[in-house]
Image (tube, helix red, strand yellow):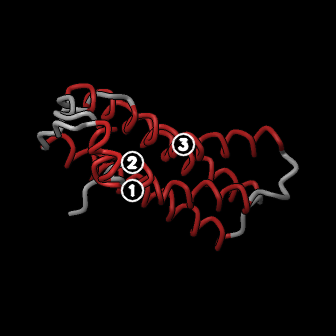
Amino acid sequence: MATVRKFEDLLCWQKSRELVKATYGALNNCRDNGFKDQIQRAAVSVMSNIAEGFESGTKQEFLNYLFIAKGSAGEVRAQLYAAHDIGYLNIEKFKYLNGLATECSKLISSFVKGLKTSNFQGLQYKAAPKEDPIKELTRERSPELFKKFYPNG
């Protein structure tokens, strides 16, 4: 399994990004601005809470944000039913968007399950690097400069 270094690496975040784009596209011509705003905000909330949780610093905070994101995915699904029932979405668009929202929920649930059983505690508890990162970068990229500024290695 690849190491996740940034929230953009998370499959649940990538899928939630697709959900946002598809939701905005599907309701682009909807004149009910209140409804359109609500469902779009819920879709953006899924993506945003995954990112915010990842950056939060602790495992517990991350889990909390993931549950909020999952709740927002449920909100999107509920609003999609309303959009279809009212006539804002045809059955094909409804099924596609509902599938994306459901997939987001499943991916988040799976990620939560894995995170709960992992040893990861969060970046807040990560040990500080043993060596100065600038020193290390200088050593890698410019050995001559490294010798000049760090003569004792």
Q: In this picture, is 129 found above or below 109? A: above
Q: Amino acid at mark 3?
A: Glu
Please name whichever residue, 99 or 84, is drawn nearer the observer in this view of the structure: 99
Q: Residues within 10 Å of mark 2 (few under 14, many from 20)?
A: few
Q: Under tag 2, what secondary structure?
A: loop
* Residue 36 horizontal/vertical position (percent): 75, 46
Pointer 1 or 3: first along the chain:
1
Secondary element under disc 1, as helix, strand or loop, is helix
> CB of mark 2 within 8 Å of CB of mark 1?
yes
The label nearer to you, 3 versus 2, is 2
Query: SS for tag 3?
Result: helix
Q: Nearer the viewer, residue 33 or 130?
A: 130
**Residue 9 image label:** 1
Q: Exactly how many numbered labels are in the figure? A: 3
Precedes in sequence: disc 3 or disc 2: 2
Residue behind mark 3 = 75
Q: Is 145 on the left or on the right of 8, as rendered?
A: left
Q: Amino acid at mark 1?
A: Asp
